[in-house]
Amino acid sequence: MGTNLTSLSISELQQGLLGKKFSSVEVVAEYLANIKKYDASLHAFLQVNEESALAKAKQLDNKISQGESLGALAGVPMGVKDVIVTKNLATTAGSKILVDFKPPYSATIVEKIESAGAIVLGKTNCDEFAMGTSGENSGFGPTLNPWDKSCVPGGSSSGSAAAVAAQECLVSLGTDTGGSVRQPAAFCGVVGFKPTYGRVSRYGLVAMTSSLDQAGPLARSVADAALVLKNIAGHDSHDATSSQQPVPDYVQDLNKPIRGLKIGVPKEFFSEGLDKNVKEVVQKAIEKVGQLGAEIQEVSLPTMPYALAAYYVICPAEVSTNLARYDGIKFGKRLKGDTLYEVYTKTRGSLLGAEAKRRIMLGTYVLSAGYYEAFYVKAQAARASIKADFDQVFSKVDALIAPTTPTVAFKLGSKTQDPLAMYLADMYTVPANIAGLPAISIPAGLVDGLPVGVQFIGQSFNESTLLRLAYNFEQATEWHKLQPNSKI
């Protein structure tokens, strides 16, 4: 056959299927072979849906042979982050407390990709209840970075990013609360897109921070990410926070040039804490965007330095509320106790990890009667100020360009004993979540053999401009074509 089926883009894959150069069963089998070959060490998948995936591939081949019409994602092998519920397929949210939970329904976005013809290969590993920056907080063990297995892949969508980078799936779904799609995308050298809050239904997402959580795609190219986004976006009557804004054809405008677009460089993203080598890569990316015809200008977001602090008040506050349901009674696994209190304490004490407990405690504290005004109310006020700063900047520019992360992927275990140092890895991704804005990370270079991501942040519901920017940059560079050496 000669074709490496796991290296094809969505359009190349579908052209080959329709031209009968290969079958969907062959494609799925090759991806499953990669999972068997690489995942014993990477641990990107928590479970593989092999039998179902091959059955759906066979159904697709039959449709093609009979000349039936196909969905936009027909034959696309996908991974789904394990905080997104899947009917009759275990959804653990990376937590031992949900180890046996099989949902009676699928999330809206899972229904959408499957109705468009995508084939779900399995559920990808993640930090417990999406709480983490490194992928090390999973109750079932960490995911490793395909570029260097001594390094973290980023989090919390650790498995989704690593699986795409290692060609264990073509694209994947993740969730982004404070950078959990973009940050692992940067660390693993893939594309990660966080849509505007409300653009994609949250129905069926295991909630961590309801006012910040947003699902988005991870892919090896901007075009693939755009196509997946087009098929998961849109209003959902099951989700009161989903927007009724019309969904444009994100793929149609990718080829439009970016000449004349005004791109802001927020100076606060280039202050202390940014690794000098990462800074150099991002500056070269900014120069490239300028060479493509965009107008580059420095801008300021004065309240941006408060974003991380506001996030780590708002996030734990909502975590403490959302995780109250995991008590051994309503949801999840139950440990026996002589009293109701013992059931609660044994179940939560034994089955929840350290980061989940830490955020529950922090959240309970900032919501308590004596501290609510001092912390939570002030954090919400900071959130409003940050959003106002972005609004003012976007009256002058079309989008922003900035680093995705302050460093490249760090070593496993290097920050697990210092939560504050771990939280700082989100310093450049959190602001977009606080303001509810769309943002995308794409590969922009290497430092010490590890990927560096550059981030574009846009105006609410203007995902099209971001994708066009990212696509133009991608096509003018070679970084997205690089593969992790440790896998080869």
Image (spheres, rainbow, N blue to C red):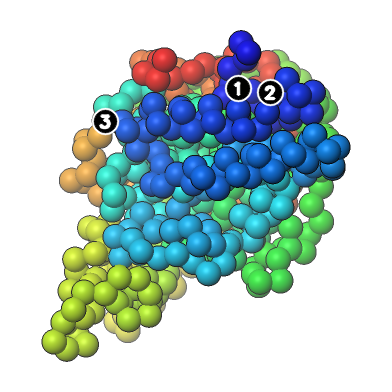
Dot 1 alpha-carbon crowd within 10 angstroms: few under 14, some 14 to 19, many 20 or more: many
- The answer to whether residue 29 shows anywhere in this view is yes
Quadrant for the C terminus in the image: top left
Residue at numbered disc 3:
411
Q: Which mark is residue 22?
A: 2
Disc 3, SS: loop
Could you tell which of marks 1 and 2 lies nearer the N-terminus?
1
* Residue type, label 2: Phe
Dot 2 alpha-carbon crowd within 10 angstroms: few under 14, some 14 to 19, many 20 or more: some
Disc 1, SS: helix
Q: In front here: 291 or 374?
A: 291
Q: Which mark is residue 459?
A: none
Q: x, y percentage for residue 169?
A: 53, 34
Could you tell which of marks 1 and 3 lies nearer the N-terminus?
1
Q: x, y percentage for residue 100?
A: 35, 64
Q: Are marks 1 and 2 in contact (CB under 8 Å)?
A: yes
